[in-house]
Image: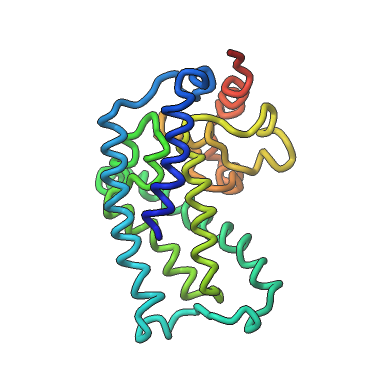
């Protein structure tokens, strides 16, 4: 399931943006160049390792009764009601974004970066395949959010499946190399708090700032959003063919 989500969503993004409309959409590319084939292969190779690690950690927590009984996972929606069921999703996004932001910043520590995060940053011009292109040590950090979910808040058996489907869609968008939000979105009341493909692309290109995943709350509050972000977003969304 984890692998299927990744290869399908990343594959769709790659097919349309890097194959079918490669020439027609090139003027919209955030960085006006494409990665090399070796970059795609590296990203897919590390992503496969990440998928194996994600599955290895997750499977016992949800499928081995002697372990699963200690988690907060439940099967009947009526146990906590439909209101909680739907409110759990925004809660999970906030929890994941917070976990990601601080873990991500920590992995940029000079001593930890080569061990955990360097592999991901080899994609200085990321493609959709970079979404899961982690070193195995970083993959273990990333899958930690599943452990947090399953031992802190009630998690219905469908929560993880649906949440991580939405996560990989947004993660692929973040690494797409193209901006899908419209011109001016970054300055709207909602858009100034939402992470964008331009924002994350800058992080890959320059290695500093823009540490968020879904939102920009922590980046803005802690002063880690890049000062050139607004200008870069405007430049990328105002180009004409």
- Residue 3: % across, % down: 36, 54
Image point 33% across, 55% down: which residue?
51
The front one of 137 and 154 is 154
Image quarter (top left, top right, bottom left or bottom right) of the C terminus: top right
- Residue 8: % across, % down: 43, 47
Q: How many marks?
A: 0
- Residue 226: % across, % down: 53, 32
Residue 191 lies in quadrant: top right
The answer, for residue 208, to whether it is visible in the render is no
Residue 23 left/right relative to 134: right
- Residue positioned most to the front: 20
Image quarter (top left, top right, bottom left or bottom right) of the N terminus: bottom left
Above or below: residue 239 compared with residue 79:
above
- Residue positioned most to the top: 241
Above or below: residue 51 compared with residue 231:
below
Above or below: residue 168 compared with residue 202:
below
Image point 41% across, 44% down: which residue?
131
The answer, for residue 20, to whether it is visible in the render is yes
Image point 36% across, 58% down: which residue?
141
- Residue positioned most to the right: 189
Residue 76 left/right relative to 208: right
The front one of 204 and 65 is 65
Image point 37% across, 68% down: which residue?
58
The front one of 235 and 178 is 178
Residue 125 left/right relative to 182: left
């Amino acid at each position: 399931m984890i692998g299927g989500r990744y290869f399908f969503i990343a594959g769709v993004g790659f097919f349309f943006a890097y194959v079918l409309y490669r020439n027609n959409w090139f003027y919209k590319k955030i960085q006006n160049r494409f990665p090399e084939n070796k970059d795609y292969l590296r990203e897919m190779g590390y992503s496969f390792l990440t998928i194996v690690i994600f599955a290895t950690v997750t499977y016992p927590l949800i499928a081995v009764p002697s372990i699963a009984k200690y988690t907060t996972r439940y099967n009947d929606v009526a146990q906590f009601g439909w209101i909680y069921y739907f409110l759990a999703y925004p809660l999970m996004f906030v929890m994941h974004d917070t976990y990601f932001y601080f873990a991500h910043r920590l992995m940029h520590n000079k001593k930890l970066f080569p061990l955990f995060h360097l592999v991901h940053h080899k994609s200085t011009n990321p493609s959709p395949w970079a979404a899961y292109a982690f070193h195995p040590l970083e993959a273990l950090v990333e899958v930690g959010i599943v452990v947090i979910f399953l031992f802190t808040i009630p998690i219905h058996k469908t929560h993880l499946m649906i949440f991580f489907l939405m996560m990989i869609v947004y993660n692929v968008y973040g690494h797409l190399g193209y901006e899908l939000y419209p011109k001016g979105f970054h300055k709207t009341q909602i858009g100034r708090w939402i992470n964008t493909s331009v924002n994350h692309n800058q992080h890959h290109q320059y290695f500093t700032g823009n540490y968020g995943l879904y939102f920009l709350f922590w980046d803005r509050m802690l002063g880690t959003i890049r000062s050139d972000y607004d200008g870069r977003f405007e430049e990328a969304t105002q180009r004409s063919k």
